[in-house]
Amino acid sequence: FCSRLTSGALLGRGLWSDGAWAFCLMGAIASCICGGSSPAPPPAKTDASAGCSTAGYDWSPPAEETKSAPAAPVPAPAAPAPEPEPEKPKPPPKPAPTTPITLETLQGEWVNSMGAKIKVTGTEVALNGLVMKMHPLTLNEDGSVSSVGRLWQLRGWLEDERVEFKEAPSKEVMEFARSVIWTKATEERMEEWTQQMKGLGYSGSASNPLSRGIEGCCPGTSDAAARIVKDDVDRDKAELKLLNDLIIKYRLPGLRKVPPRLVIPDFSNRGHTGLSVEHVHYLATSFRDKGFQTRKGDQGHDIPVLVQESTTSDLGRKSIENWRAKLQEETGFPPKEHYERTFAGQEIYTSLGNGHFNQALNLFANECSSIYNGKKYLIGNDRNLREAVETGVSAIIVRGEITLKDREIISKLLNSKREYKWKVAADGTVDIADSTEDHKTCKQFEALSKVLDAVELNCLVRSELGITDSHRIGQ
């Protein structure tokens, strides 16, 4: 006890005054006696000007704690998003019926895959409220449905009691045609159809097609279900290569001049609808009024692509029969006698491309009259026109063994790739795969004339020429 007390007293002796030190020592002794524990050393007297120098001790005042800024409140965790309800599984489709599709089957209202509303009453078919008088339902001998005029050929039942048609003028050419699906106009289906039409812009004042005076603005008449297709360079190259490969596969060497009198449309041309009489006269009028322009390099008229065909082959006979039927119903083409002289021979040429061009020249060969103003098509002093009428122009000739499918592909690609300019070598070799695209602007009329069938092209020519009074309107 004495040693601890003495050491504490001695330690503080130098820092305290005598009276203060004695008082502190007495308090320490009393605390020790009463508390039963060793007295704590008296607090050292701190000199403000100097700190304690005793080794092992630091009697300097503690540094003030730095007050830190209050921490930002931690945001409460967001409530977890509710899990979406699982979609109800769709019921499996109903198997396609096996019963025949009769006239009674198609009665009532339908919606087709192109966005059009259809109503069948008897044999009459109405498209968006407009009765298609030229395209009634046709029946087979057993009473089953065959087609909707020359627009859609019936193919048969699909699942869920849907009916598939092919967009083709005849059964013989419908295999590769686009499918058009009819679905019964149930309340659920009509709700889907209404939403689809609103998304395509057919709402408000456009919702009632019969109140509009613009042809082609009815849903379904302008391919409402089609999607925007962007330019695809790779696809263009692939299609040009396909066209080039097919021509190389079947063509005869070099280019040949074939007199137009030996040429008729191929059975496969323009979806088997033949040629547009209005466009034939449009070209003939241009030859007469502006003079015949010969082809120079890659500029000028298109190079005709012709099939060297026998008059007795299967496709040769079909081409002849198809063209005879066209001449029977349309008097605006050159007279039938002109072609019968060719049909009596053993060889004809059928056009896969540039068919209107050759028949326009035949109008001059027969000095036919214009269907527009009655003026005759006379060669006169146009030497280039005379040579084209009597001798023909340089053409690509393919062998008659070419299949119907390949004819259709060539015919389609010749028109759809009209903007690509072919390169013709001195020996008659034609390079299509590496042809260059012509980026010059052209009239919409010229572009559309390459892809429409004969009936549509007639309408286009009348629109271009401003013809409003013709017995061909509506045909």
Image: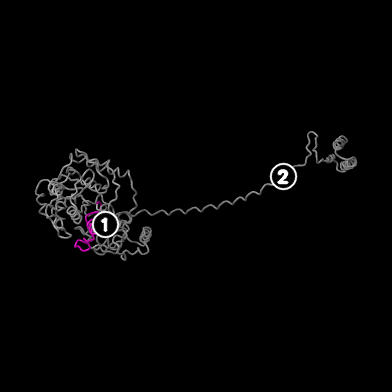
- Amino acid, disc 1: Thr
Q: Which mark is residue 65?
A: 2
Classify the position of the C terminus by image quarter.
bottom left
Task: Please tell me the numbered disc located at residue 80.
Answer: none
Magenta range is: 450-475
| Colour convention | one colour
Q: Where residue 311 sits: x, y (%)?
A: 12, 47
Q: For marks 1 and 2, give the one nearer the viewer.
A: 2
SS of the residue at dot 1?
Answer: loop
Q: Earlier in the sequence, mark 1 or mark 2?
A: 2
Which image quadrant for residue 94? bottom left
- Left or right: residue 250 versus residue 54 is left
Q: Is residue 155 visible?
A: no
Residue under pointer 1? 99
Q: Please, what is the three-letter code of the amino acid marked with disc 2?
A: Glu
| Extreme residue toward the front, this view | 381
Regarding residue 77, the answer to whether it shows in the image is yes
Please state which of residues 388 and 381 is positioned toward the viewer in this rendering: 381
Depth check: 371 or 267 in front? Answer: 371
Tell me, yes or no, whether the highlighted magenta stretch contains residue 459: yes
For the residues labelled 1 and 2, the Cα–Cα distance comes to 95 Å
Number of other residues with Cα within 10 Å of mark 2, as a class: few under 14, some 14 to 19, many 20 or more: few
Instruction: Please name whichever residue, 37 or 466, is drawn nearer the observer in this view of the structure.
Output: 466
Q: Position of residue 380 (x, y in %)?
A: 12, 52
CA neighbours of label 1 inside 10 A, class few (<14), some (14 to 19), many (20+): few
87 vs 54, nearest the viewer: 54
Q: Please, is residue 120 above or below residue 175 in the view? A: below
In which quarter of the view is residue 371 placed?
bottom left
Residue 373 within the magenta-colored segment of the rendering: no
Residue 473 shown left or right of residue 187 in the figure? left
